Image: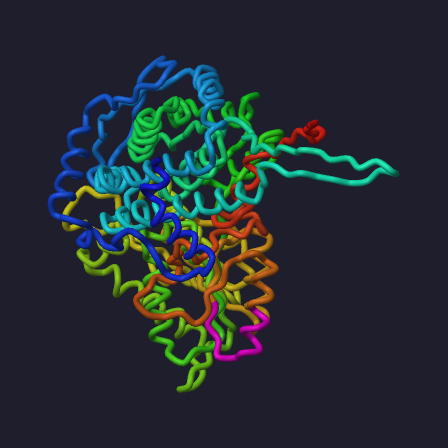
Amino acid sequence: MMFDKHRAIFERAQTACRERHCWSPFPDMPGKYPDAEAAQAKGLAAFKGQLGKRFVLDQPGHVSDVGEEVSPYTQDPLGISYPQSDIDTLFNAAENAMPTWAEATPETRIGVLMEVLDVLYRDHLFEVAHAVMHTAGQSFNMAYAGSGVNALDRGIEALVYAKQAMDAVAPTAQWERRFGSAKIALEKTYRVIPRGVAVCFSCASFPTWNAWPSMLASLATGNPVIVKPHPVTVLPMAISVRVFRQVLARAGFDANLVTMALDSTLEPIGKLLVKHPKTAIVDFTGSTRFGQWVEQNAYPALSFTETAGCNTVVLESCDDLDAVLRSLATTLCMFSAQMCTSPQNIYIARRGVQTPQGLVPFSDVARQLANAVAALTSEPKKAAMILATIQSPQTLELLANMALLAHEYKGVETKNAVDILLTPAAYRHPDYPNARTSTPLMLKVSTEHRSLYGEERFGPISFVIACDDAQDALRQATQDVKELGGLTAFLYSLDEAFISQAETAYAKAGAQLTINLTGPMPLNFAAAYSDYHVTGLNPAGNASLTHLAFVASRFCISQSRRPVKTITI
């Protein structure tokens, strides 16, 4: 039984989820992978061997081939074509595959899915990393860690919660009660019934991180999955879907429990999938606009969304301003702020930030932060490691438009004029001279410029915002989270009363708060088995990937009951 093969790791994961401590069965750096040099060479060869060819994926309903991926590093097409299938055929195949899978025990299903993760890790991890690198634009190390081993951890985590939810359902019970002089005894049987076909959208910048746990949450609870990749980042999910299908088939189940529905940027099919009469579950990660449409239109299907928001920083006081600004600068630059947890809006009292050395004026703090970012991005080799590339040309357009808009604001003579702290510019990647790149745009603004910062500006764009005082900074920040959405938040303060107030305010606003963190760990690092991701309490998403609610509603419970048989001697 596959579950026995993976039992030790799964039980360790159960303990980690319960105790929330640091643990992973996977090495955190590429160099620590077993026989790393050979494994990396094999993964790179597999990736290169796929370029310019048709991706082999044996699934039903083939109608045409599509493919439009372009590497952000080379800006050359990958040249890979993928089989596009008829949507109705995929749904019918998924429904036909479901009964045998649904009848399997939870341990059987989870064992098969643990095997999928093991195969992804052992045989395809570096292939996936290069696929993510040359579609999403992440650096190699981030593709390995964030889209590789951490995504695998998040997948195991989803399986832990799925088992916990299903184990809460007793399979049988004997029930007795008196009705008058008669005693009624019933045998009751309870069944976990999957809801139906799940549609899983994967996003352009982090295709595996959200998709793997979503797929596993649905499959573990008995539902088939149709994966809808973003058309510019298909390869990581195509590799994943093929592995799922191969392992399911080897385990004796119908491979059509996992299929892939493809489209193009010119002819999207997302709304057709969400509104398809056989769609029972929708997992969506991506833009706020389409995520809100999914939430409003998925019914009667359940929807689980993670979109975007204005992640906030409140800087009130600190004991080491340089350390704080270095940490903020690193996190602002990480993967060019193309992560759902990247900070964007930094709220500071107009008078400045209190330190042991005295009050540092607002303008000085803003300039020092800009200098810290510039120090990370001015040298191409260092910039390549932290900024990586810009995933989409649309992000470059947004940077240009925001810079132009800032110049227009700057020309307006007001008491609180906009100041351009950092102007974006392409940097030359040392290994890929044609890479799509940009250094960050940073603006110094005040709260009267909310039209500039009052929505997510995806990419390396940040705002240092002058507020009336610390209370106003906290009020503005948490109000923006509540109204505009926010996944993560960051606070720096030496005032315990202010910290307590901020914890309560951010909890009500629904953002996960990090307090006074500095050092080598990126501020927005999310630890599997420990950190909850998304609260579902503001417009940045309606569900968390990391607790029981993410899996428990993917199945229903039916029951039958009958009188207890009496034995006559």
Using residue 569 as the reference point, say whether residue 288 is left or right of it. left
> Residue farthest to the right?
180
For residue 117, which quarter of the picture? top left
The C terminus lies in quadrant:
top right
Please name the residue shown 52% across and 41% down the image.
551
Q: Nearer the viewer, residue 2 or 253?
A: 2
Query: Does residue 79 lie above or below 285 as drawn?
Result: above
Q: Quadrant of residue 372?
A: bottom left
Relative to 376, 1 lies left or right: right
Q: Position of residue 116 (x, y in %)?
A: 33, 36
Q: Name the foreground residue: 397 vs 346.
A: 346
**Viewer-nearest residue: 238 or 295:** 238
Residue 304, placed above or below residue 264: below
Image x and y of residue 418, in percent: 46, 61
497 part of magenta stretch:
yes
* Residue 454 included in the magenta stretch of the image: no
Q: Residue furthest front?
A: 569
- On the question of residue 563 being in view, the answer is yes
Percent x, y for residue 439?
29, 54
461 over 564 or under it: above or below: below
| Quarter of the figure that contains the N terminus | top left
The part of the chain drawn in magenta is 491-502
Identify the residue at horizontal 69%, vertical 31% (top origin).
564
